[in-house]
Image (tube, rainbow, N blue to C red):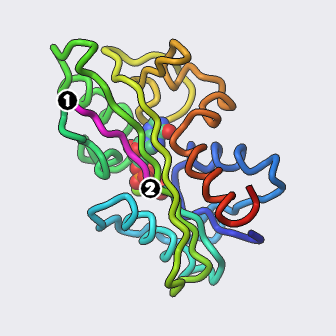
Amino acid sequence: MQRTVFASNNAGKVAEVAELLRPTGHTVIPQSEYLVPEAEETGLTFVENALIKARNACHHTSLPAIADDSGLEVDALQGEPGIYSSRYAGEHGDDAANNSLLLGELAGVADAGRTARFRCVMVYLRHAEDPAPLICQGVWEGRILEAPRGAGGFGYDPVFWVPQEGCSAAELPPETKNRLSHRGQALRALLAALGNG
Ligand SMILES: O=c1nc[nH]c2c1ncn2[C@H]1C[C@H](O)[C@@H](COP(=O)(O)OP(=O)(O)OP(=O)(O)O)O1
Ligand SMILES: [Mg+2]
């Protein structure tokens, strides 16, 4: 896995993936370093959107690419915001607005009904026309808090309760989040599939 582009503009993902790869000796180069233009996420599944992003990065760099498409599935909202997690409140990537909309939608829902999970699909494309991409997934179960807690992480981390640690995802040390998270699971599976596990 030499000179692989990471097809994401999310600084939180970039930092987590860099940390996960550090002990393996692999590095990935964020697509911003190649000035890759943002791809439109027009797919109806995490898999399709991850492929769109990876293919776009391959196309613009002529290098292999890894992409991550991820989101939060809330049971009381029939799986929403799901693939639309980043655009939930309208503007792409407005974490504060997304979190407050989510808490508003769940107002009055008791603790037992606030189950949710993060899902991550990671794909690896050897080149833009790669007909056999590697596709791996990870899932992280938790619950939605009634108010944000913690300052670490990104996205929905402050409102995501991690039962086995007794804190929010934004209160976890980065290495603990990477050990448990949907992203950590998916990337470890991808590395194993690449023969570098
Ligand atoms: O570990 C996580 N902790 C908190 N929130 C998270 C996590 N993982 C995904 N999420 C949320 C953030 C965003 O609202 C959506 C991902 O959207 P998604 O399109 O995959 O990523 P993005 O637009 O931020 O960056 P990019 O597409 O350039 O990779 O799910
Ligand atoms: Mg996105």
Residue 140 placement (x, y as % from top left) = 46, 35
Specify which label sits upstream in the sequence, 1 or 2.
2
Residue 31 highlighted magenta (yes or no)? no
Q: Which mark is residue 114?
A: none
Lateral position of residue 139 relative to residue 32, left or right:
left
Residue 150 placement (x, y as % from top left) = 51, 18
Is label 2's Cβ within 8 Å of ligand 1?
yes
Lateral position of residue 133 relative to residue 33, left or right:
left
At label 2, which amino acid type do we have? Asp
**Label 1, on which residue?**
76
Picture quarter with the N terminus: bottom right
**Label 2, on which residue?**
69
Residue drawn where x is 27% and y is 34% of the image: 74
Lateral position of residue 51 relative to residue 130, left or right:
left
Is label 1's Cβ within 8 Å of ligand 1?
no
Distance (Cα) linking label 1 and label 2: 22 Å
Pick the front one: 159 or 187? 187
The local secondary structure at tag 1 comes to: helix
Looking at the rendering, the stretch of residues picked out in magenta corresponds to 70-76
Residue 80 placement (x, y as % from top left) = 23, 41
Residue drawn where x is 55% and y is 45% of the image: 183
The local secondary structure at tag 2 comes to: strand
Pick the front one: 99 or 183? 183
Q: Residues within 10 Å of mark 2 (few under 14, many from 20)?
A: many
